[in-house]
Amino acid sequence: MTEPLIHLVCGATGAGKTTYAIKLAGEIGAMRYSIDEWMTTLYWMDSPDPIEYDWAMERIGRCEQQIWSLALAQAQIDKPSVLDLGLTKKSHRAKFAALADESSLAFQLHFLDLPAEERWERVAERNREKGETYRLDVSRENFDFVEGLWERPGAEEIRALNGIRIAD
């Protein structure tokens, strides 16, 4: 199999996606695109309070379109991209796999799999410490909301997306 040019990083909130994406991009010489960074730079400062789901999803969609165009440009010069987009739902992962397929690009899913309570502890610590991957506070209410949206990849999906499961 050809080395993947598109790396799809997925995991629930607090799984360590951005930290993993930074490390992976460095190891393979890839460009990294993290949705939280894009949203923080472009939109969060103008967001309604509290943040509205539809408002956020519209802007996330805009960012993802631009990110995909940049990943395609990278692929044209044979450079890999790491897409740290959350990829919470199976349909979201399938969308990016289909985009890669349509462009004849090899891709790989990287699934970060950690228990919910461990992930919440990480989020709470990130909220307190505001370190390198901090972008905004995630309340327990928001964590639980996104947890309700999370669709964990099963073995068949992982296999179909040339995936690997990473557990701490």
Image (cartoon, rainbow, N blue to C red):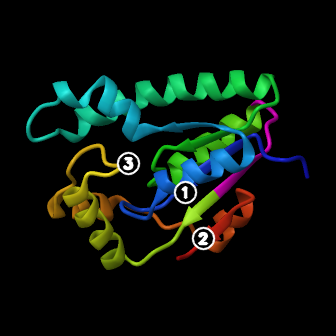
Closer to the camera: disc 2 or disc 3?
3
- Spatial CA distance of label 2 from label 3 is 21 Å
Q: Secondary structure at mark 1?
A: helix
Q: What's the CA distance linking mark 3 and mark 1?
A: 12 Å
Residue under label 2? 166
Q: Depth check: 3 or 96 in front?
A: 3
Q: Determine whether, in the image, residue 161 is placed left or right of residue 17.
A: right
Q: Residue at x 20, y 50 (%)?
A: 137
Tell me whether the residue at label 1 lies in contact with that at label 2, contact meaning CB atoms closer than 8 angstroms: yes
5 in relation to 164, above or below: above
Q: Position of residue 75 (x, y in %)?
A: 76, 29
Q: Amino acid at mark 1?
A: Tyr
Residue 61 visible in the shown view: yes
The residue where tag 1 is placed is 20
Image: magenta residue range: 103-109
Q: Place residue 138 in its image quadrant.
A: bottom left
- Residue 45: x and y in percent read 19, 27
The count of marks equals: 3
The residue tagged 3 is 132
Task: Determine the secondary structure under disc 3.
Answer: loop
Q: Which mark is residue 5?
A: none
Q: Amino acid at mark 2?
A: Ile
- Looking at marks 2 and 3 on the same chain, the residue that comes earlier in the sequence is marked by 3
Residue 107 drawn in magenta: yes
Disc 3 marks a residue whose amino acid type is Glu
Mark 3 or mark 1: name the one nearer the start of the chain. 1
Horizontal relation, residue 85 to residue 49: left or right = right
Residue 21 rendering spot, x and y as whole percentages: 56, 50
Q: Position of residue 13 (x, y in %)?
A: 36, 60
